[in-house]
Amino acid sequence: MSPTLPTHVKLVEVGPRDGLQNEGALIPTADKIRFIQALGKAGLTHIEATSFVHPKAVPQMADALEVLASLDLSSNSPITYSALVPNLKGLERAIDSGVKRIAVFTATSNSFTQKNIGMTVAESLTTFETVVQQALAAGLSVRGYVSTAWVCPYEGQMPAESVRDVTEALFNMGVDEVSLGDTIGAATPVQIQHTLSVLLNKHPNYLSALALHCHDTYGTALANVMAGLQMGISTFDASAGGLGGCPYAPGASGNVATEDVVSLMDRLGINTGVDVTRVVEATALMETLLGRPLTSKTYQRLRTVKTESCV
Amino acid sequence: MSPTLPTHVKLVEVGPRDGLQNEGALIPTADKIRFIQALGKAGLTHIEATSFVHPKAVPQMADALEVLASLDLSSNSPITYSALVPNLKGLERAIDSGVKRIAVFTATSNSFTQKNIGMTVAESLTTFETVVQQALAAGLSVRGYVSTAWVCPYEGQMPAESVRDVTEALFNMGVDEVSLGDTIGAATPVQIQHTLSVLLNKHPNYLSALALHCHDTYGTALANVMAGLQMGISTFDASAGGLGGCPYAPGASGNVATEDVVSLMDRLGINTGVDVTRVVEATALMETLLGRPLTSKTYQRLRTVKTESCV
């Protein structure tokens, strides 16, 4: 175990976007805004609020403009809101919305990008190069996602060198942060550290600009977060309640739960600036809105009457 | 990350005992036996089947003799069944039952042992010394549990030196395995490794005889299992479905789920001899019997129609 874990960790709350876009239920815009406001009250300073993908592709995000219009997008706001942008059309809508930060997304696997965005990885990088250039020119900042950074549902284990190359391409086009995704939650802590080692051995300067985006399909997400911490990673994506997953496999593949990450960081003495009890309040709100139980362990624990009488 | 993780891991299934004793529902004996048989079919070779604590204290275990009478306790059986024994009276019943392995239990915290078994830690060690001597004389083997090895619900963080001293006392009285319990699931991977280091620095020969018993109250159990693996620990307790927890906080503090541990080991290439799909079948059976959802991630994933269409 590394003797020197980071003293501060930045959490990027992706529940309103990565979480809700994968939920079966359509959450009314006003309720979605209440959820985002509850997340802000919990102390989360980076919230991916929505996505400018085509409403037909992701109906849950059709209200992107309304959601962003309700948030304080000024530079005075203590919270940085971001929106996912798939193409130039999405960028135009993002710029119109006034959002100051966008995210672009590719992957290491051609099979995955073909099914997800209808392009090869190389084609997606070409597309996003223009998107990133125009976003930067318009004064926006840009985050990049690399999906299937460890395991692709169609191609299996992905080589660390592919992750390195795609990450390089994203940083070279001007993104300021790259989030590496264990998209199907199948990576192990050993694989997390191997890929990070290959990437950081060539680019040690990337360390502070890398984020880990772990899904918790098989319950390994916090072990993978810990593996990232041991490598010095200090930015982690999470979603309140472990939102996400798939309508066909309820609860199966959401993001790691924000409250579980905060609970671990609190116990490790690592500062996140986030109040776990208030994250649990946001999760409770979303559980009611979704009408399905959210089962993150920390939520299950803290939402109930605290008792140690049966330990 | 340690470059040399164990190649084989022994899992001790504690669902029928530690799991069910903490469930609100009383499971009929015949159903309990079906559950234990399903666990055996999954390839689990070490199953803690029941407990000889007083039926008034733990009504869920009142059928200990009937449960054991239904199992193959012969030395030819591929499965080693064990029973928890709190005192000499319990040992008499265990010997009568024909069970070949028992477990005794103490803790690092006097507050905890006082509330749990009405004795100080020192008094419990004196009591169990006689129990262990008579068990060994009767040809039984004995496992020891050290509860609150990291955090006590009443005393907070426990010093690693207390864990070391209690573990020494148990090995010195003749137990062949000591299971260190993160009883309330509050330990971090850093604390897991610190305590193991203090213990193993003085007694490196203990390594192969130590087990980790992690509860998943805040979702950190697999990260703690991984921390143990990195230290060379190769025996882990688990319960199918993450059974356990507390009637007052549903789902809050069960053991780490057997299927989550097996899934991690499978992906790490570590042999357990256990078929995760059959563990999931045992979990599905118990979910039906309990009438409450069991929410281990691997169970949630594997019980549903497999689809990667929404990753």
Image (cartoon, coloured by chain):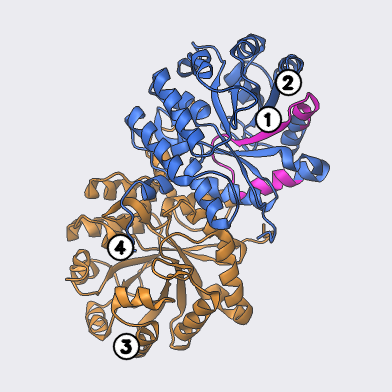
Chain colours: A orange, B blue
Pinpoint residue B25: horizontal percent, then vertical percent. Answer: 38, 23
Q: Which residue is most to the front?
A: B76
Q: Nearer the viewer, mark 1 or mark 2?
A: 2
* Location of mark 2 (residue): B125
Residues packed near mark 1 inside 10 Å, few (<14), some (14 to 19) or many (20 plus): many
Q: Amino acid at mark 2?
A: Leu
Q: Tell me the magenta residue range.
A: B168-197
Which of the labelled discs sits on residue B108, or is there none? 1
Q: Is residue B246 above or below residue B58?
A: below
Residues packed near mark 3 inside 10 Å, few (<14), some (14 to 19) or many (20 plus): few
In the displayed structure image, the side of residue A27 where residue B29 appears, left or right: right
Q: Nearer the viewer, mark 4 or mark 1?
A: 4
Q: Is residue B250 above or below residue A267?
A: above
* Location of mark 4 (residue): B310
* Location of mark 3 (residue): A138
Residues packed near mark 2 inside 10 Å, few (<14), some (14 to 19) or many (20 plus): many
Which numbered disc, 2 or 4, marks the residue that appears first in the sequence? 2
Badge 3 and badge 2 in a common chain:
no
